[in-house]
C-alpha cells in the first residue's frame, strides 16, 4: 500500500533509508517505506519491523490514506 501511495506522489526521494530489520535496503519498496515513515503515514508494526509480506487490512489502508491526505 505504501508503495502505491509513494508512486502516486511521483516516487519522491526519502532523506534516509528505512530502518526496519525486515526491509532490505535493496528491495523495490525500501524507498517507499522510508518515505512513508518520514511523512507519518506508517510507523511499522512494532519491534523494529515493518512486516512487508503481511496482508494490509481495510483499517490499515484507511489509516494510510487518511494520513496521506493530511
Image (cartoon, grey):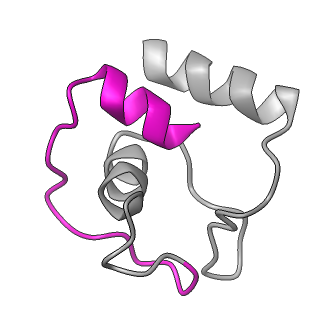
Identify the residue shown where x is 35% and y is 34%.
6
Q: Residue 5: within the magenta?
A: yes
Residue 39 falls in image quadrant:
top left
Q: Is residue 54 left or right of residue 39?
A: right
Q: 57 or 15: nearer the eye? A: 57
Q: Name, please, the residue furthest toward the top.
A: 69
- In magenta, the rendered stretch is 1-22
| Percent of width and height locating residue 55 | 82, 49
Q: 16 or 53: nearer the eye? A: 53
Give the position of the N terminus as an image quadrant: top right
Identify the residue shown where x is 32% and y is 48%.
35
Q: Is residue 26 left or right of residue 69?
A: left
Q: Is residue 46 left or right of residue 42?
A: right
Q: Name, please, the residue furthest toward the bottom.
A: 21
| Percent of width and height locating residue 38 | 32, 49
Identify the residue shown where x is 37% and y is 70%.
18
Identify the residue shown where x is 86% and y is 37%.
57
Question: Where 59 sits versus 12, above or below?
Answer: above
Q: 66 or 26: nearer the eye? A: 26
Question: Where 50 sits versus 4, above or below?
Answer: below
Residue 37 can be seen, yes or no: yes
Q: Is residue 36 left or right of residue 58?
A: left
| Percent of width and height locating residue 34 | 34, 58
Residue 41 can be seen, yes or no: no
Question: Where 63 sits versus 42, above or below?
Answer: above
Give the position of the C terminus as an image quadrant: top left
- Secondary structure mainly formed by the magenta segment: loop
Amino acid at each position: 500500500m505504501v508503495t502505491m501511495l509513494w508512486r502516486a506522489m511521483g516516487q519522491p526521494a526519502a532523506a534516509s533509508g528505512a530502518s526496519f530489520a525486515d526491509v532490505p535496503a535493496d528491495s523495490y519498496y525500501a524507498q517507499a517505506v522510508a518515505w512513508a515513515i518520514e511523512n507519518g503515514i506508517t510507523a511499522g508494526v512494532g519491534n523494529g519491523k515493518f512486516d512487508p509480506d503481511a496482508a494490509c487490512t481495510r483499517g490499515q489502508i484507511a489509516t494510510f490514506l487518511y494520513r496521506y491526505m493530511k
